[in-house]
Image: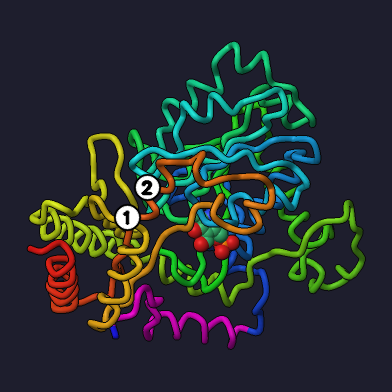
Amino acid sequence: MIPFSPPRIDEATIAEVVDTLRSGWITTGPKTKQLEKEISSYCGNSHSLCLNSWTAAAQLFLDWWGIKEGDEVIVPAYTYCATANIVHHLRARPVIVDVKSDFTIDVDAVKRAITSKTKAIIPVDIAGLPCDYENLYKLVMDEDIISLFNPGSEQQEKLGRILIFGDAAHSFGASYQSKMAGKFCDVTAFSFHAVKNLTTAEGGALTFNLPNAFHMEHIYKELNTMSLHGQNKDALAKSQKGGWRYDVVSPGYKCNMTDIHASIGLVEIKRYHGNLERRKFIHERYSKAFSELSYCQVPLGEEEDRCPSWHLYLLRLIDLTEEKRDQLIIDIESKGISVNVHFIPLPMLTAYKNMGYYIKDFPVSYDNFSRVISLPLYYQLTDEQVDFIINQVKDVLKAHFNG
Ligand SMILES: Cc1ncc(COP(=O)(O)O)c(C=O)c1O
């Protein structure tokens, strides 16, 4: 069976992890700090903070930003549940809006959803494809929208408008209008979960792109402290001679990244360019092959001012019901190819149905979901496997669509 998305673990990764294990320092330390530097330099940001997941990174930051009960945060229907769950954890209300045919958040729908309670928008770069940031920024900078904004914390007051917090769980390495992911939004969170383009097994990072009024050195220190229970010294500082005494400045979270995880990331980031090139090659090969069939709708690739990170290959079929799509998945899997669906829209999940959301109100999300199949896309796929996937999937499709 060709797996869907195995991590790329080889001797280089193992050697780096073993080096950490042998070093005597396995929790947050020099390798995590090194990874932060590498991420900042790759993305073009002054500061990055590595944490133990996208979810923890988002919760930590949005809590610090002052998102709380009574606030609204706009999220797309077409995403993984984490995007909206973290809003719920902060006792705020996730306001779900529909997406466009390219799977990214619909800026007109965002505009209609903004109220005086809106504090943030979380656009999601699904499959690694950057959202329409130009129009999102035009919207939050619009005078009428700014006059509606009601800041609820010192930070919000300083920004003076709705925050754009990027869900870049899929888009490390994507670019938009000559900027790398990590620079598209005011603040961005990456995921380094096992299936992501760049992994640390579990992990995530925040990158910052806030205006000059924000003192980044202070913010980095404050969030770093908040990721360690609000303790003003980390384990490394405490381990120094005479360094045992500490204080807890505020009741923080516990979501730091360990050096074991960071060591995997250090190997990944060093060879990331080659990873992206290979993914792009496979993505384009799929698109060339499937666009020969009139009932296939291939995903967007590289455009003039936006380039995806080639994280997922979302193949849609024209005129297909959800039930028929499910049958196609069974047939493809019976050929020895693992496939997937990204994602079940939030309003179809019990938790969000119970909050009063109905999928009928999100027709584009449902249409995208009901006709989509994610094909394997990763560095280690050989050319032979790619050809096998193309041929087998084509055979299954031809049988269903009669030719
Ligand atoms: C779009 C999106 N956002 C957020 C997350 C959450 O990432 P993590 O597992 O690192 O918390 C994921 C994970 O799959 C995701 O796909």
Q: Nearer the viewer, residue 308 or 364?
A: 364
Q: CA distance from mark 1 to mark 2?
A: 6 Å
Q: Quadrant of the C terminus?
A: bottom left
- Judged left or right of residue 222, residue 244 is right
Could you tell me which residue is drawn at 63 percent across and 52 percent down?
352
- Inspect the image, locate mark 2, and give the three-letter code of the amino acid beneath it: Asp
Identify the image's colour scheme: rainbow, by chain, secondary structure or one colour. Answer: rainbow
Q: Within the image, what quadrant is residue 30 found in? A: bottom right
- Judged left or right of residue 167, residue 353 is right
Question: Where residue 314 sits in the image (x, y, percent)?
Answer: 31, 57
- The magenta-colored residue range is 2-23
Check if residue 403 falls in the magenta segment.
no
Could you tell me which residue is drawn at 23 percent across and 35 percent down?
304
Q: Which mark is residue 371?
A: 1
The image shows residue 341, relative to residue 57, as above or below, that is below
Q: Which mark is residue 204?
A: none
Q: Is residue 37 visible?
A: no
Check if residue 10 falls in the magenta segment.
yes
- Inspect the image, locate mark 1, and give the three-letter code of the amino acid beneath it: Arg
Q: Residues within 10 Å of mark 1 (few under 14, many from 20)?
A: many
Could you tell me which residue is drawn at 58 percent across and 11 percent down?
143
Q: CB of mark 1 within 8 Å of CB of mark 2?
A: yes
Could you tell me which residue is drawn at 48 percent across and 38 percent down?
98
Q: Nearer the viewer, residue 1 or 57?
A: 1
The image shows residue 34, relative to residue 201, as above or below, that is above
Q: SS of the residue at dot 1?
A: loop
Q: Quadrant of the N terminus?
A: bottom left
Task: State yes or no: Cβ of the residue under disc 1 lies below 8 Å from any atom of ligand 1.
Answer: no
- For disc 2, the marked residue is 367
